[in-house]
Amino acid sequence: MVQAVKSSTPLRMGVIGAGIMGANHARVLAGLSGTDLVGVVDPDRGQRDLVTRVLGCPAVSDIDALFQFGVEAVTIAAPTHLHHDIALACIQRGIHVLVEKPIASTVEEGREIIAAARKAGVTLMVGHVERFNPAVIAIKEAIRGEDILSIAITRVGPFPPRMSNVGVVIDLAVHDIDLIRWFTDSDIVEVQPQLSSAVAEREDIALLQFRTASGVLAHINTNWLTPFKARNVTVATRGKYVMGDLLTRQVTECFGFQPDGAYSMRHVSVGHEEPLRAELLSFIASVRDGKPAAVTGEEGVASLEIAARCLEGRPAKTAAPEKAGVRRAAG
């Protein structure tokens, strides 16, 4: 059972990892009432100096130094392969944890984190921030109670400037695997992946097809080869067709289909709150009242498990195609 932190004093929070995502966590936490950003951890001196200069909070090189500040809750935005050890170190000290997606490098590591959090009675939440995107929330509301038939999600963009030890399935598609499970309130039971490594060492193109236990067909198109970012969701139900742009946060639904092909269309009202801020407020609320997190460790592991199934038997780097009329020399 999670032990709630019911106190009139600010929640003492820390951020572990001050890269792009971690720096954003720190920025938002520094501006929230009811919280006190007591420290940020990063091994890079330049990042630490930047955090201290911009946010005015202490920045240290290791988590043991952060523990000395009496931190009560942390967000972990370190590289994925470090999530397991960092999360366990925090949980063993009774510290509540929000860990960025994916929860860990492997399903087994994710389950170990869940077990440790349950034993210690601390809140564990996984940072699937797209759940808090106002456009995603509007889509979820638009299809509530509908008989969902299919879902198609496109999440593409240029190769990320940061160095990464994962490909597009873990970096991008895991967001949408989580959304498919959330939209349908159903587990994914069939996986049909098509992967390619055109430029990167790991897969940089993925076309993923799924079937949920409830019978919904879903498709994810993701890559690191598109020169611009695109984040689009379409959901077909028996009663309506919903289209959402997760970047511009525009959601439209078509309904009232007639035999002659006529139909009605309307724009759906979408909120304006910053997704990361909403996510952190949700985590803090769970820490305060002891209620289950909005994205539980079990949900994070379930999405990671599907992503891992997509990567089984991933292909080697794609060779450059031969020119027409030219045969490769033997030997």
Image (spheres, rainbow, N blue to C red):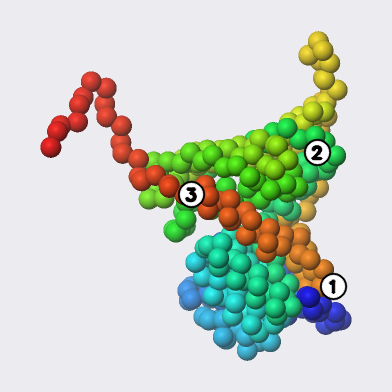
**Secondary structure state at the residue bearing disc 3:** helix
Q: Nearer the viewer, mark 3 or mark 1?
A: 3
Looking at this view, is 310 or 71 the one in front? 310
Residue visible at 30% across and 32% down?
321
What amino acid does circle 2 point to? Ile
**Secondary structure state at the residue bearing disc 2:** loop
**Placement of 309 over or under 151, stated as above or below:** below
Give the mark nearer the N terminus: 3 vs 1.
Answer: 1
Dot 3 alpha-carbon crowd within 10 angstroms: few under 14, some 14 to 19, many 20 or more: some
Direction from residue 307 to residue 285 in the image, left or right:
right
Q: CA distance from mark 2 to mark 1?
A: 30 Å
Residue visible at 69% across and 48% down?
187
| Extreme residue toward the left, this view | 331
Dot 2 alpha-carbon crowd within 10 angstroms: few under 14, some 14 to 19, many 20 or more: many
Q: Where does label 2 land, which residue?
A: 143
What amino acid does circle 3 point to? Leu
User: Residue 233, percent across and down?
Assistant: 67, 38
Q: CA distance from mark 3 to mark 1?
A: 38 Å
Q: Where does label 3 land, which residue?
A: 311
User: Residue 84, percent across and down?
Assistant: 55, 71
**Secondary structure state at the residue bearing disc 1:** helix
For residue 289, the mark is: 1
Give the mark nearer the N terminus: 2 vs 1.
Answer: 2
